[in-house]
Image (cartoon, rainbow, N blue to C red):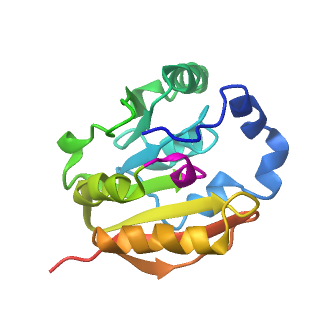
Amino acid sequence: MSHRVCPFWMGYLLLCPFRRFGQNPDKILAPYIGSGMTVLEVGPGMGFFTLPMARMVGPSGRVVCVDVREKMLAAVRRRAALAGLVDRIETRTCPPTTLGIGDLAGKVDFVLLFAVVHEVPDVPKLFAEITPAMKPGARCLVAEPSFHVSVGEFDQTIAAAAQQGLQLIEQPRIWGSRTAVLSPVRP
């Protein structure tokens, strides 16, 4: 799913070590990810969050990364190989119209949508594909850059998620971001 996709070169900037001062993946994700979990990350860039998540899920877990850009996923795989984490990370190139995650129905413990929803042309469809993949009690962290996404736009994102069966659980503070943690509403 592509719309206003950030350019490939921006991926290098997003890996900047100084980013950890405001957006430390270990601190941000620790409340949501544990050993043995299956994690879905849409739009991983070059893996700023991917590698820490792979460490968190441990040898028995896995991180599934979906992106429209094979070039970004290739960078994730290279970095994962160097870190000895390649066996925990699965990468999938998707077409602009679907995530292609139907095989993950009811298997995902945590979904990360970090600075990606504003790039998606059909936000309701994004959440319509993610919701069935989530286990009961699973969490989805949505974080959008506050300098790029207005409060109104973020509220529309949360409303689109609610229409697809996700409810707002909390809004953690993450530097430079508008955030929401969502969970499936199950009968």
Compared to residue 150, the image places residue 54 above or below, namely above
Q: Quadrant of residue 64?
A: top left
Q: Residue furthest right?
A: 18
Q: Quadrant of residue 150?
A: bottom right
Residue 33 in sight from this viewpoint: yes
Residue 30: image location, x then y, percent? 56, 62
Compared to residue 158, the image places residue 59 above or below, namely above
Compared to residue 155, the image places residue 127 above or below, namely above
User: Within the magenta stretch, is there residue 115?
Assistant: yes
Q: Residue at x 59, y 35 (%)?
A: 45
Compared to residue 142, the image places residue 99 above or below, namely above
Left or right, 96 with respect to 74, comes to left
Residue 181 in sight from this viewpoint: no
Q: Quadrant of residue 109?
A: bottom left
The quarter in which the C terminus is drawn is bottom left
Q: Which residues are magenta?
A: 114-121
Left or right, 54 with respect to 175, comes to left
Frontmost residue, 36 versus 4: 4
Q: Residue at x 60, y 24 (%)?
A: 79
User: Within the magenta stretch, is there residue 21?
Assistant: no
Residue 120: image location, x then y, percent? 48, 47
Q: Residue at x 63, y 55 (%)?
A: 26
Residue 23: image location, x then y, percent? 72, 56
How many numbered discs? 0
The quarter in which the N terminus is drawn is top left
Frontmost residue, 66 versus 55: 66
Left or right, 57 with respect to 12, comes to left
Frontmost residue, 34 versus 45: 45
Q: Residue at x 28, y 60 (%)?
A: 131
